[in-house]
Amino acid sequence: MPSGRTHDRITLWGLPLITSLTFFQTQSGNLTLIMAGAYLFSGLMFGPDLDLYSRQYQRWGFLRWIWLPYQKVLRHRSIFSHGLLIGTTLRVLYLSVWLALVGIFVLGVAHLIWGVELSWQQLITESRRSLTQNAAEWFYLFLGLELGAMSHSLSDWSSSAYKRLQQNRAKMKKRKGSSTQLKRRK
């Protein structure tokens, strides 16, 4: 399995490719910036290795405690952390719950201190409007998060497959060597 430093390098080396392909496809600086930012965030801080004590986890600084329940529930390299689409979707939902809890707290404090009134219906209506009016931005945000996570997962899988191939070759070589020695003894 590649080290955290190797995953960081893969993310940084992939950034120019992701950025240029996105700009070529969209011809939009805004969508390219969203995609590149999400890709970097996912590759460096929001990737599959949040399920263990990793560089990504450590980069959350004093907020890293929010990932402890996530680590306790998920097994490392499970489909729910490293799975394509599933892992990113689960992390987005998990972080959204935390952000919603913080939002509820902030709204409660704002109501108590300043008397700010904001109804749940208004909040839901605004959220729906944002999702429909900014569908392309939300799509490229999620795609950037997924590509950052995919670069991590694919490098893990390819590294593991390569190691298994090397181990199988060594076993085959060892078997051939011992069968050749048996023939020589006879």
Image (spheres, rainbow, N blue to C red):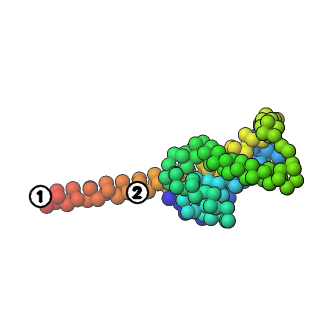
Percent x, y of residue 138: 75, 41
Residue 36 visible in this rendered orientation of the protein: no
Query: Which residue appears at 81% of the width and 40% of the height?
Result: 119
Percent x, y of residue 39: 69, 51
Query: Which residue appears at 13% of the width and 61% of the height?
Result: 185
Pick the front one: 160 or 162: 160
As measured in the structure, the alpha-carbon distance from the residue carrying label 2 to the one carrying label 1 is: 31 Å
Q: Amino acid at mark 1?
A: Lys
Whether residue 180 is situated above or below residue 137 in the rendered picture: below
In this rendering, which labeled residue sits more in front, label 2 or label 1? Answer: 2
Q: At numbered mark 2, what does the secondary structure look like: helix, strand or loop? A: helix
Pick the front one: 108 or 137: 108
Q: In the picture provided, is 158 more to the left or to the right than 180?
A: right
Pick the front one: 34 or 24: 34
Label 1 packing within 10 angstroms: few (<14), some (14-19), many (20+): few
What residue is disc 1 on?
186
